[in-house]
Image (cartoon, rainbow, N blue to C red):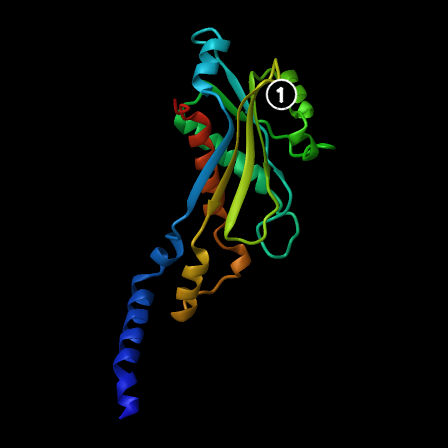
Amino acid sequence: MAKNLFRPARVIVLTLAATLLTTGCSYVRSRYGEQCNSRAYLNSSLADFINSRFHSNSQVRMAVIPFSTEANLSPRGSEFPGLGDQLAWKVHAELLQAEAMPIIEVFNRQDWPGKKEEFFTGNFGALSMAREAGYDLVLVGLVERQKGIQSMSAFTKVMDVDSGITVWYGKTTASSNQRTMDRVEDFFWLKDRDPSELYLDELIGKTAKCIVKAATAEPEV
């Protein structure tokens, strides 16, 4: 009699698993409910700054420098090759979509001595290189050391190249519901990839979108 009590539940589970397998698992793998939030430490209006700093119809140029990275998002702890570069290109795409300014380019200078350390002490190297390359504004960032693959945090600055003034400075954190969905996949035997390699693209994309939204938003009065 006891065995019969478990039979309906088993049938329901197996039926649901079969449905997921036959209809594909794109929904399970793609919808992890990424969330983000930004905290602005310096929140000037980027649009107002550009309008007051440059003549109307000026071809204002912004350089996006690949983000400095402390460590990768996986538990292995080694630096993730290309993470800062990937984030820079995502930010570049979001800035273009937002039409933040006429010319936005990734200044593909990956690293230089003291790049990480100078983020909190002036960004003199980034300003100097952007100035020599003829840019008007420069966006620099640093990805915080991560403790897992559930979230990603980055500091970002937008600076005027000529004066060195910081126009916008904030911290953005993106997170994922991956762990919950992993348990669902485990239950239905759908998981076939190394967890350390999952969902970085989603986190990078969400972080970039959140950075640009915060940096280009009008400050609250």
Residue at the spot of label 1: 130
Q: Quadrant of the C terminus?
A: top left
Q: Is residue 129 above or below residue 118?
A: above
Q: Is residue 15 above or below residue 94?
A: below
Q: Is residue 75 left or right of residue 47?
A: right
Residue at point 33%, 61% (across, down):
24
Label count reads: 1
The front one of 57 and 46 is 46
The front one of 220 and 183 is 220
The front one of 219 and 137 is 219
Q: Which percent across, then down, holds residue 117?
A: 70, 34
The front one of 69 and 147 is 147
Secondary structure, mark 1, is helix
Q: Which percent across, then down, holds residue 137?
A: 55, 19
Q: Is residue 6 left or right of residue 114?
A: left
Q: Which percent across, then down, holds residue 106?
A: 55, 28
Residue pushed farthest front? 221
Q: Which residue type does callout 1 highlight?
A: Ala
Residue pushed farthest right? 113
Would you call the spot at circle 1 few (<14 residues within 10 Å), some (14-19), or many (20 or more)?
many
Residue pushed farthest bottom? 1
Residue at point 46%, 59% (across, down):
179
* Image-quadrant location for residue 129: top right
Residue at point 48%, 21% (across, down):
44
Q: Which percent across, then down, holds residue 40?
A: 49, 30
Q: Is residue 93 above or below residue 183?
A: above
Residue at point 41%, 47% (across, down):
34
* Image-quadrant location for residue 130: top right
